[in-house]
Amino acid sequence: MFFLASRKRECCAIVVTGRSGQMRILIVEDEEDLSRALAKGLKREGYAVDSALDGLTGWELADTNEYDVILLDINLPELDGISLCQRIRRSSHQHDVCILMLTARSHPDEVEEGLDSGADDYLRKPFVFNELLARIRALLRRRSSVKSTVLRFDRLALDSKTKEVWFENALIPLTKKEFGLLEYLMLHPGEVISSERLLEHVWDINADPLTSTVRVHINSLRKKLLHHDPAAGEAYIQTVQGHGYRWSPRAAGEKEATT
């Protein structure tokens, strides 16, 4: 089991935005070792991760980018975590972000303060990393109205916990980015998602900003789906010219031009 603890007496808050699996997370934590450990563990799970070492930098990143998860320390330089949490909640840019606070504090009044500042959940340190992951998945399901870790359509199943995609009994080998793209599209069925939005959620701040990056991965994903289901590649992931992509399974009865 993986325990994560801080040397500081004060603790951290974690802000979570997205829906599960390959989503984008911002860590705002001034203790570099802890921030690095969180980033390493979350990247290993397939999340795209950005980091900030103080509250103001964290706010600048949160105000500029769209995150699915933000990990936020309470006791931060420049701008404390409670104030940052409140500022994020007032922001129209991140109005629906989920917030999970991680702290060594255990007094009920301190828990109440964190939750009243806008947090959605509270996890005390030290904690088991797998519990943190489970809480993140639960928050993302709550946000997306998906109640299971498994997304299904027809004979296709995507498990956000195991990071596996199955067609009937056949495992479809996907890269982390392909998995992230598929999961994000499946969590927003029928919605047209721009390439820029996919870059925001599936890639981190160091990603190539060119939208051709998304197109290349979408085409690779289509080929792998097509290999298992001859109708899947084009009908499942449709290209809406000039606007982006849509998870619109063949049951929708529509067909857009593909790249």
Image (cartoon, helix red, strand yellow):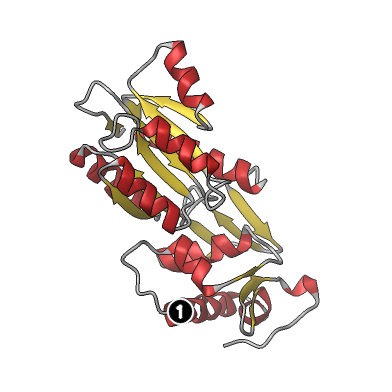
SS of the residue under disc 1: loop
**From this viewpoint, is residue 19 visible?**
yes
Q: Residue furthest right?
A: 253
Residue under the point 38% across and 41% down: 71
Residue under the point 46% across and 79% down: 211
Q: Does residue 158 sit above or below 86 in this rendering?
A: below
**From this viewpoint, is residue 131 visible?**
no
Residue 153 lies in quadrant: bottom right
Q: Can you give x and y, in whole percent of width and height, for residue 219 in the image? A: 51, 81
Residue 232 lies in quadrant: bottom right
Q: Is residue 219 left or right of residue 256?
A: left
Residue 242 lies in quadrant: bottom right
Q: Can you give x and y, in whole percent of width and height, for residue 229 in the image? A: 63, 76
Q: Is residue 245 left or right of residue 5?
A: right
* Label 1 packing within 10 angstroms: few (<14), some (14-19), many (20+): some
Image quarter where the N terminus lies is top left
Q: Can you give x and y, in whole percent of width and height, for residue 227 in the image? A: 55, 79
Residue under the point 38% across and 47% down: 59
Disc 1 residue type (three-letter): Thr
Q: Is residue 76 left or right of residue 123?
A: left
Q: Is residue 13 left or right of residue 178?
A: left
Residue position marked by numbered label 1 in the rendering: 211
Q: Which residue occupies the foreground of this view, 90 or 16? A: 90
Counting labels gives 1
Q: Can you give x and y, in whole percent of width and height, for residue 29 in the image? A: 28, 39
Q: Does residue 8 sit above or below 198 in this rendering?
A: above
Image quarter where the C terminus lies is bottom right
